[in-house]
Amino acid sequence: MDVNASTTKPAPGLKRPNMLYSIAIVLIVILGSVWALSIDNRFLYLLVYVWFGVIYGIFLQYGRFCMAAAVRDLFAVRVPRMAVGMMIAVGLYALVASVVTLAGFNTFHAHPLGWHVLIGGLIFGFGFVFTGGCASGSLYKAGEGNMNSMLVILAISFTQAIVVAESGWLNWMAPEAWVASAAAKDMPESLSVTEGWFDLFTAGYFWDMKGATLGEMLGAAESPWAMAFWNTFVNALLPVIVLLIALYAYYYRKSYLRKSGLANPSLKDEISGIWHMCISSKNTAIAGIFLGIFAGLHMWVTGVLREHYEIFNFGELLSAMGYTQGLSVQDTVFDPGYWYITTQEAQWGAWVLEKLGIDMMDNIFFGLDNGIPNPLLNAPGFMSIGIILGAAILANARREFKWKMPSLETATFAIVGGILMGIGARLAMGCNIGAFFATVTNGDPSGWIFLLGMVGGGYLGVKVFTKWMDWKMARDGGCDL
């Protein structure tokens, strides 16, 4: 199912207005950047997130790049195009990230590896089958005018905020070991780690584990080149090569050999077939290449700016500029330093709930770590807005922008799928970008565990959705008779 696809070609007369819309969006970004810098040139740090978000949005839209589509296409129609593009992006990001790391500007922090990654990925993958887009895919499709995707974003945002701030109604799920471990932690008086399940999960389980890259696990931390070998080649490039070979062998080889007339292919022929598979969809391959490169450059630019401003977190800059409202008790905000999506969306939902009078800062997730900054001061939040704007720029330029309102059925799928994606993202501490794309490319093996869960959830989702569609068609057919 792709509730976001549109095959209707716009009339030729729409070309000029659509280009004007693209130009107008570019001017808004430029003028907004100039205005922000005129207030304080330290807003450059925030604007970097905006600009890279626009770039991500352009290439996501250009390649119709969506990890939900990659998983769905493999199981529903046996087409590896998007999965191949995803692997290309992973490989390029890993190479650039390695250079950034060797230069000393890498901002990545490894995730602890545990059952939560697999289960979170499973729930996330099951949910995105019904929304028609992953976390990044929903953003760029919103930039194409798709209101189903906006519903997905809203569902993800408010679900995460509610899950991390709930006050005890899920505590029956917390083992006594979590409760005891959380109670032993030295916490600020304004926070309580015994009132909410997610606090117990965080302080009583998550904090007791240590995140590490593959190189760190193998004791190679003293040698940058050894770290690059284990983190880049072994953890990222080698699995990408293996997966590309598997995609070729299982999904592409048979049709390629038939079309090529090769009855007894040589190794050279097989390699040629893999290459042909990688370039068979030019737009997707190009998108994968540039997404990988710019994701790595994003880390480098953020790292350079942190060194320039002598900060570790954007909250320090906000505090120095006098913007202290919404900072955590540590004067921090969410500031990963690289491409991320779902956490800033959780902040959006929490900010709205705060305005409605609900205290959202008495928990670890917001109160201790990420804060709830005003959306106008939320750097990663502007990155997500940048993705929407970048996609809108290219969609209008290509005459692919079209307002698409949801039906009751697709709206229900969007909301329910978005809720599941929000739950999965919080359990796994990230989505298809933060828990997979940004992790495996920086040497963190937990990303492959998330991918395994996400693919498994996607497979189950496709099966459930297919059965539902079969039932619906049988029901509708019966009514017609």
Image: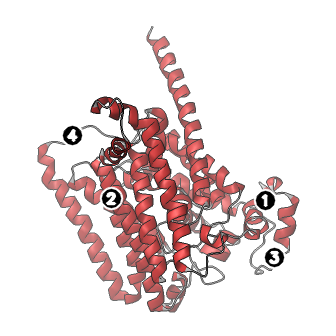
**Residue occupied by mark 1:** 168
**Residue occupied by mark 2:** 59
The alpha-carbon separation of the residues under discs 4 and 2 comes to: 21 Å
The circle on residue 185 is: 3
The alpha-carbon separation of the residues under discs 4 and 1 comes to: 52 Å
The circle on residue 299 is: none
Choose the circle earlier in sequence order: 4 or 1. Answer: 4
Q: Nearer the viewer, residue 445 or 128?
A: 445
The alpha-carbon separation of the residues under discs 3 and 1 comes to: 18 Å
Q: Pinpoint residue 257: horizontal percent, then vertical percent.
A: 34, 33
Disc 1, SS: loop
Asked if disc 3 and disc 1 are in contact, CB closer than 8 Å, the reply is no
Choose the circle earlier in sequence order: 3 or 1. Answer: 1
Q: Nearer the viewer, residue 264 or 182?
A: 264
Asked if disc 4 and disc 2 are in contact, CB closer than 8 Å, the reply is no
Q: Pinpoint residue 291: horizontal percent, then vertical percent.
A: 37, 62
Disc 2, SS: helix
The alpha-carbon separation of the residues under discs 1 and 2 comes to: 42 Å
Q: Nearer the viewer, residue 303 or 259?
A: 259
The alpha-carbon separation of the residues under discs 4 and 3 comes to: 59 Å
Q: Pinpoint residue 474: horizontal percent, then vertical percent.
A: 50, 16
Question: Which circle, 3 or 2, is nearer the viewer?
Answer: 2
Q: How many marks?
A: 4
**Residue occupied by mark 4:** 9
The alpha-carbon separation of the residues under discs 3 and 2 comes to: 44 Å
Q: Is residue 388 above or below residue 231?
A: above
Q: Does the rendering let one see residue 44?
A: yes
Q: Does the rendering let one see residue 40?
A: no
Question: Which circle, 3 or 1, is nearer the viewer?
Answer: 3
Q: Which amino acid type corresponds to the residue marked 4 in the rendered image?
A: Lys
What residue is rendered at 49% in x and 48% in y?
243
